Amino acid sequence: MKRLALFLITACLSVGAMAADVIKAERMEKFGDITVHYNTFNSTFLTPDIAKAAELTRSKNQGVINVSVIKGGKPLMAQVSGTVKDLTSKTVPLTFQQITEQGAIYYIAQYPVPQQETRTFEIKVQTGDKINTLNFNQELFPGE
């Protein structure tokens, strides 16, 4: 699982760098003393071993969203849920699974990417009694 955590961190950084022309911003949001890092990418960026370990489907038509919650420089457990909406307002619920490894906690979910389009994500992160909501748009592309 250490390889999975390392890969997801690397994927977040490298996908962010590759998409810098589109995104133009770091993918994080602060809510008081809590920082939520997030990124989404096509599942073909995952190696077959990593996808299998994370129980993810590796396909050109599947995207992955990765969320981590940090407080005081340390990973924080949270309840993460959300949806992704296409341009016709068709909404797909995101089912996040928690991955806990030594020194890291990630929440990952998959969603369909049938064609190139901009999608709207709404991610709810609950820590204790507080629920914070991330809303962002992302242009998505099916993989090769």
Image (cartoon, rainbow, N blue to C red):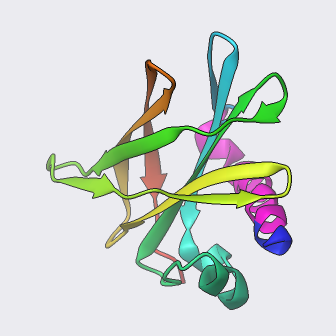
Q: Residue at x 45, y 58 (%)?
A: 140
Q: Quadrant of residue 40?
A: bottom right
Secondary structure mostly seen in the magenta stretch: helix
Position of 4 compared to 27: left or right?
right
In the current view of this chain or complex, which residue is farthest to the top? 32
Depth order, front residue of 32/103: 103
Q: Is residue 46 above or below residue 137?
A: below
In the rendered structure, the answer to whether residue 126 lies left or right of residue 44 reads left
Taking the image as shown, residue 144 lies to the left or right of residue 3, namely left
Q: Is residue 10 magenta?
A: yes
x and y, in percent, of residue 64 in the image: 52, 63
The magenta segment is 5-24
- Residue 44 among magenta residues: no
The structure residue drawn at horizontal position 31% and vertical position 73%, both measured from the top left corner, is: 114
Residue at 70% of width from left, 44% of height from top? Answer: 20
Tell me which residue sits at (78%, 73%) in the image.
1
Q: Quadrant of the C terminus?
A: bottom right
User: How many labels, in total?
Assistant: 0
Figure check: 114 above or below 24: below
